[in-house]
Image: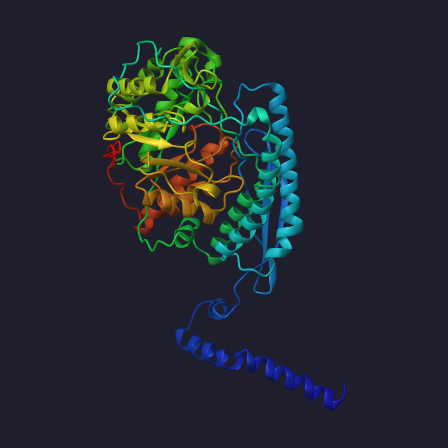
């Protein structure tokens, strides 16, 4: 190297250091370090210069196939970021599988078709992530959650629109051109007839047309998987707890956090279960707000254990078998058997049913509709019309005041009867909508009915749902005076993201399943850890008492 080349090289070095302010910063830190006299001189220098480093950016996403708690294929994603000029693995997440669109007792051929489509969809989603989204998000900050969610949601929504158009074309046949059932206003002067005992009504019931299920585009799982892992990466690169980071995304400047109340499935029944009882899919317990989360979980495990031992002693060791959500699966012919057993278990824990612990029921009414007869099969062989169901549930809740939650008591097509039921019970009970509402992609854009016919709503992270989209729907439902139940899916994994999401958004309830199976327990354990951290930091606030929002029948229009 000759003298001129050496001079040019030195000049480039001088300009480089000068442009980046290195000499000035070196002088500042050396002067301050001398006076501060730190024990770890190099650690002091690292801490000082770290504030001037460029923010981490995404280098690549790496997706692979894994399996959920049911053995179904799902997606693992790793996020690699460039941090301080080095590419590093920041985090990895395994997303849950979406719930099945068919009942557990569906035909084997139908189940096989769905399983094949699920496997193909996961494979395509992995290809999208590795080949499309990974280069698309390169050099983006993992903290740009809204931007990431918008890009991936827009991309997948185009594919979903194409799938919807294709599916609609296949369904558009002369046989399918049937007018859905509508509630016909009755003449107010006409004499109303009381429902006949046993559920038989003399008024002809119109046939209900089953609402066609939306077929999600192949690869839809990529939205939830990418959104979730980018959220975790954002928190990791910021060096803050995930729930605090989620809280900042939710636009809440809160210094205090509440622990969500667990809504826990103890027993499972329903149309697909053994026994004649169809009208209760889940028997649930919910602790009172005055109990801490740690206290509540101890009692919940005790209640679950008591119920399990009682069932085993009466029906044998086969009662240890559990559902996909970890719930016990007894064969009940009467709903009183399950409700009485829960009350007995709560009492055995030295708790007061209805005060220390409440009971909830998931009716999942959409699963027990006989569409040809337009009625609900509450018990095998016993059919009730929509009007009869209002009286049925009102009578059950009057006999069991411990019940404070009922999920989907009627089908969405029976809006008039749903409102009648709300008017009768919502002073002391949460009427919760789950199947009533569409998936978040539609819910965020659709106008809510007036009046809103629930005072609580179940929302979940799955398939086409992004973190930003879920937050939008949570705010929308809370603005409509609905408490939020953040729910896990049937095909969960041991990833505990949902626990941080619930705390970060400050939702009222979390529905994870039973205190059984590893993919459920991992989330309950994470909530224990969060509660401990919040207590230590002085950031844990107590839950307020339940506030039941009464839902009234609309006033009759004056002609």
Outermost residue on the bottom side: it is 3
Q: Residue at x 26, y 19 (%)?
A: 190
Outermost residue on the right side: it is 1
Q: Could you say which quadrant of the image residue 480 lies in? A: top left
Above or below, 551 relative to 312: below
Q: Residue at x 28, y 46 (%)?
A: 541
Outermost residue on the front side: it is 559
Q: Residue at x 47, y 42 (%)?
A: 442
Above or below, 322 relative to 1: above
Q: Could you say which quadrant of the image residue 65 lies in? A: top right
**Residue 434 shows in this picture:** yes
**Residue 299 shows in this picture:** no
Residue 356: image x %, image y %?
A: 25, 29
Residue 25: image x %, image y %?
A: 49, 78
Describe residue 264's horizontal placement relative to residue 494 as left or right.
left
- Quarter of the figure that contains the N terminus: bottom right
Q: Residue at x 46, y 32 (%)?
A: 520
Residue 367: image x %, image y %?
A: 46, 22
User: How is the rendered protein coloured?
Assistant: rainbow
Residue 8: image x %, image y %?
A: 69, 87
């Amino acid at each position: 190297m000759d003298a001129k080349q050496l001079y040019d090289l030195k000049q480039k070095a001088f300009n480089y250091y000068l442009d980046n302010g290195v000499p000035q910063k070196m002088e500042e830190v050396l002067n301050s370090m001398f006076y501060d006299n730190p024990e770890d001189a190099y650690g002091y220098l690292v801490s000082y210069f770290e504030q001037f480093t460029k923010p981490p950016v995404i280098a690549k996403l790496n997706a692979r196939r894994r399996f959920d708690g049911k053995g179904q294929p799902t997606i693992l994603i790793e996020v690699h970021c460039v941090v301080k000029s080095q590419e590093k693995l920041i985090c990895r997440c395994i997303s849950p599988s979406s719930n099945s669109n068919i009942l557990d007792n569906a035909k084997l051929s139908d189940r096989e078709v769905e399983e094949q489509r699920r496997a193909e969809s996961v494979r395509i989603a992995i290809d999208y992530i590795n080949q499309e989204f990974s280069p698309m998000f390169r050099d983006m900050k993992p903290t740009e959650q809204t931007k990431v969610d918008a890009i991936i949601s827009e991309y997948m929504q185009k594919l979903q629109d194409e799938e919807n158009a294709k599916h609609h074309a296949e369904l558009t046949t002369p046989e399918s051109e049937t007018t859905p059932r509508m509630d016909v206003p009755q003449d107010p002067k006409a004499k109303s007839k009381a429902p006949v005992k046993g559920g038989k009504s003399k008024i002809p019931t119109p046939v209900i047309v089953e609402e066609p299920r939306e077929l999600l585009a192949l690869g839809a799982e990529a939205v939830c998987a990418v959104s979730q892992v980018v959220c975790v990466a954002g928190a990791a690169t910021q060096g803050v707890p995930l729930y605090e980071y989620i809280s900042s995304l939710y636009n809440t400047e809160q210094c205090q956090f509440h622990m969500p109340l667990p809504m826990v499935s103890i027993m499972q029944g329903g149309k697909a279960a053994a026994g004649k009882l169809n009208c209760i899919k889940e028997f649930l317990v919910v602790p009172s707000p005055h109990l801490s989360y740690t206290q509540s979980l101890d009692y919940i495990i005790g209640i679950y254990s008591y119920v399990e031992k009682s069932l085993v002693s009466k029906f044998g060791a086969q009662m240890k078998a559990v559902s996909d959500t970890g719930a016990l699966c007894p064969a009940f012919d009467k709903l009183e058997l399950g409700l009485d057993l829960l009350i007995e278990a709560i009492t055995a824990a030295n708790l007061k049913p209805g005060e220390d612990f409440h009971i909830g029921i998931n009716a999942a009414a959409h699963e027990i509709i006989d569409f040809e007869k337009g009625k609900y099969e509450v018990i095998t062989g016993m059919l009730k019309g929509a009007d009869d169901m209002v009286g049925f549930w009102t009578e059950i809740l009057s006999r069991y005041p411990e019940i404070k939650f009922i999920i989907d008591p009627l089908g969405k097509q029976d809006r008039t009867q749903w409102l009648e039921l709300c008017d009768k019970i919502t002073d002391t009970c949460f009427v919760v909508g789950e199947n009533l509402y569409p998936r978040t992609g539609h819910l965020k854009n659709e106008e809510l009915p007036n009046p809103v016919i629930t005072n609580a709503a179940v929302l979940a992270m799955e398939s086409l749902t992004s973190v930003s989209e879920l937050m939008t729907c949570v705010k929308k439902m809370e603005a409509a005076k609905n408490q939020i139940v953040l729910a896990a899916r049937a095909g969960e994994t041991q990833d505990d993201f949902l626990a941080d999401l619930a705390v970060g958004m400050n939702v009222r309830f979390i529905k994870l399943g039973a205190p059984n199976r590893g993919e459920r327990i991992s989330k309950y354990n994470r909530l224990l850890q969060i509660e401990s951290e919040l207590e230590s930091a002085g950031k844990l606030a107590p839950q307020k008492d339940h506030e039941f929002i009464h839902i009234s029948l609309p006033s009759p229009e004056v002609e």
